[in-house]
Image (cartoon, rainbow, N blue to C red):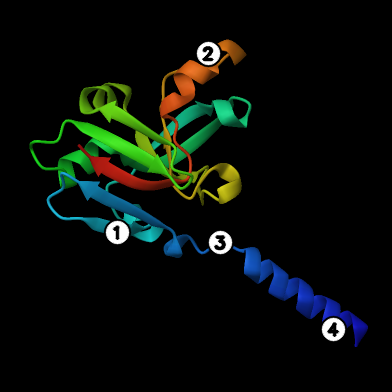
């Protein structure tokens, strides 16, 4: 009986801490054709791209990130008058990025890493990653990593 109770408790504990990716939301606001609320599953149905990137927040490990280009999201949903994207994390960290920079840097709203949905542990379920920067040294990470937004909650077109 003792082992059954332990097994039941362990199962319930694991279920309580498991992440349901489809329940995570990303809100699209601002100068949009129509405000939208996406689940991670919804984002996975948009045009996807896979980019292998050195992730400075994982000790420069190469990770094949999959998601949608921010510029594509902009093209699909932003009004013509929008020129910037404000990305807001769940902790209210935010950056404002000019659309020309977004296009030039090929910024990706990533939802998968190495074929698996990003967990909170991997700074997911949605995060902004930027290819082509190579490995970051300790002194450049603070400057170059400013637009790598984790735990994305809102994308606002300005």
Point out the tag, 2 or 1, that comes first from the N-terminus. Answer: 1
Identify which residue is drawn at 56% across, 25% down.
Answer: 56
- Along the line of sight, the residue nearer the viewer: 39 or 65: 39
The residue at the far right in this view is: 2
Secondary structure under tag 3 reads loop
Q: How far apart are the two marked residues, 3 and 4, measured between alpha carbons? A: 25 Å
For mark 4, does the 10 Å Cα neighbourhood hold few (<14), some (14 to 19), or many (20 or more) residues? few
Residue at mark 2: 140
Identify which residue is drawn at 71% across, 70% down.
Answer: 13
Residue at mark 3: 19
Q: Nearer the viewer, mark 1 or mark 4?
A: 1
Point out the tag, 2 or 3, that comes first from the N-terminus. Answer: 3
Q: Nearer the viewer, mark 3 or mark 1?
A: 1
Q: Quadrant of the N terminus?
A: bottom right
Q: How far apart are the two marked residues, 2 and 3, measured between alpha carbons? A: 33 Å
Q: Quadrant of the C terminus?
A: top left
Point out the tag, 3 or 4, that comes first from the N-terminus. Answer: 4
Regarding residue 135, the answer to whether it shows in the image is no
Task: Give the vertical position of 55 relative to 87 (above or below).
Answer: above
* Residues under numbered marks 3 and 4 in contact, where contact means CB atoms less than 8 Å apart: no
Residue at mark 1: 37
Q: How far apart are the two marked residues, 2 and 4, measured between alpha carbons? A: 53 Å
Identify which residue is drawn at 29% across, 28% down.
Answer: 97
């Amino acid at each position: 009986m003792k082992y059954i109770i332990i097994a039941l408790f362990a199962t319930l504990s694991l279920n309580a801490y498991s992440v349901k990716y489809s329940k995570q939301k990303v809100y699209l606001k601002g100068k949009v054709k129509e405000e939208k609320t996406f689940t991670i599953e919804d984002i996975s149905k948009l045009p996807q791209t896979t980019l292998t990137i050195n992730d400075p927040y994982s000790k420069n490990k190469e990770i094949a990130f999959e998601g949608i280009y921010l510029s594509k999201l902009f093209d699909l949903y932003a009004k013509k008058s929008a020129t910037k994207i404000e990305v807001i994390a769940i902790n209210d960290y935010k950056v404002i990025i000019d659309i020309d920079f977004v296009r030039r840097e090929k910024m990706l709203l990533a939802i998968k890493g190495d074929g698996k949905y990003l967990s909170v542990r991997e700074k997911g379920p949605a995060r902004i990653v930027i290819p082509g920067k190579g490995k970051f040294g300790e002194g450049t990470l603070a400057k170059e990593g400013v637009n790598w937004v984790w735990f994305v909650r809102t994308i606002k077109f300005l």
